[in-house]
Image (spheres, rainbow, N blue to C red):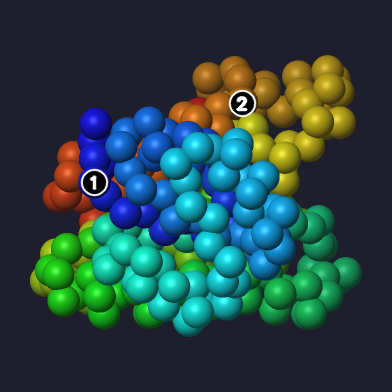
Amino acid sequence: MMLKDRVLLITNVEKFAGHGTTRVALAEGATVLAHDPSFEGPTARRKYESQFPGAHALSAVEPATLVELALKRHGHIDALVNNDAYPALRAPLGEARLEDYRDALEAMAVTPFRLTQLVAPSMRKRKSGRIVFVSSAAPLRGIANYAPYVSARAAANGLVSSLAKELGRDGITVNAVGSNYVENPDYFPPALLANQEAMAKMTAQIPLGRLGKSDELGATVCFLCSDAAGFITGHVLPHAGGWA
């Protein structure tokens, strides 16, 4: 098992790549510490833990208290998975709202930067760590009328190259998974998946001719958290069926 005895902190587990990454990480022997804004309430935590036996839903929501609680419970964090999701709002230049742009940057660049800033000191002490941003392939090609979303994802991708160089001497790797066209309820809700005409048009743009699976994305994330990826850093790995 490639993650045996590893402690993974995964953010926003009820969204985007959260479920797939949790499933694969548990199957590979990891201890999963899970964050989600809904976990302030005990009911949501119990539901998640019953769905994913062995995972630990943390009650903390804010970055500082989240990292403090994770370190208090397990002493260290081997890998941080910044799994950030925010609506891909259609926003032509003349109609885009600055508040939406700021919110996108906050969710997909500022918050994961802050979490990384808080987790890095404990990793530096141990001279070991993995940081993975679950981002998007959209900045690799650009998408018309989605500049706020795409540029916020580009900010996260840009963090990777700088942080990899800064943290590499401390044995910490920093990478991103540039995802697109992967099944998840945030970007591909059930109503869209059931629309055969829309799906045919969409999959025609994907060289592999299908949407990716959540567990496929989770497996890629977990690979970057493992020893097998120990000599990979500063990389944005497209996970988009050949679209990027």
Badge 1: few (under 14), some or many (20 or more) residues near its Cα, within 10 Å? few
- Give the quadrant of residue 19: top right
Report the residue at 67% width, 23% height from top: 203
> Residue 163's spot in the image, x, y percent?
30, 72
- Look at the image and tell me whether residue 111 can be seen: no
In this rendering, which labeled residue sits more in front, label 2 or label 1? 1
Q: What element carries label 1?
A: loop
> Residue 109's spot in the image, x, y percent?
54, 71
Q: Mark 2 or 1 closer to N-term? A: 1
Quarter of the image with the N terminus is top left
Q: Is residue 164 above or below residue 57?
A: below
Name the kind of residue labelled 1 in the image. Answer: Asp
Residue 72 or 34: which is nearer the viewer? 72
Badge 2: few (under 14), some or many (20 or more) residues near its Cα, within 10 Å? some
- Give the quadrant of residue 115: bottom left
Report the residue at 67% width, 45% height from top: 47
> Residue 11's spot in the image, x, y percent?
52, 59
Could you tell whether 142 is left or right of 244 in the image?
right
- Look at the image and tell me whether residue 82 can be seen: yes
Which residue bears the numbered disc 1? 5
Report the residue at 62% width, 76% height from top: 106
Q: Is mark 2 on a helix, strand or loop?
A: loop
Q: Is residue 211 above or below residue 237?
A: above
Residue 18 or 74: which is nearer the viewer? 74
Which residue bears the numbered disc 2? 211
Name the kind of residue labelled 2 in the image. Answer: Leu
Could you tell me how far apart the alpha carbons at marks 2 and 1 are, in whole angstroms?
32 Å
Report the residue at 61% width, 26% height from top: 211
Could you tell whether 6 is left or right of 222 in the image?
left
> Residue 175's spot in the image, x, y percent?
33, 56
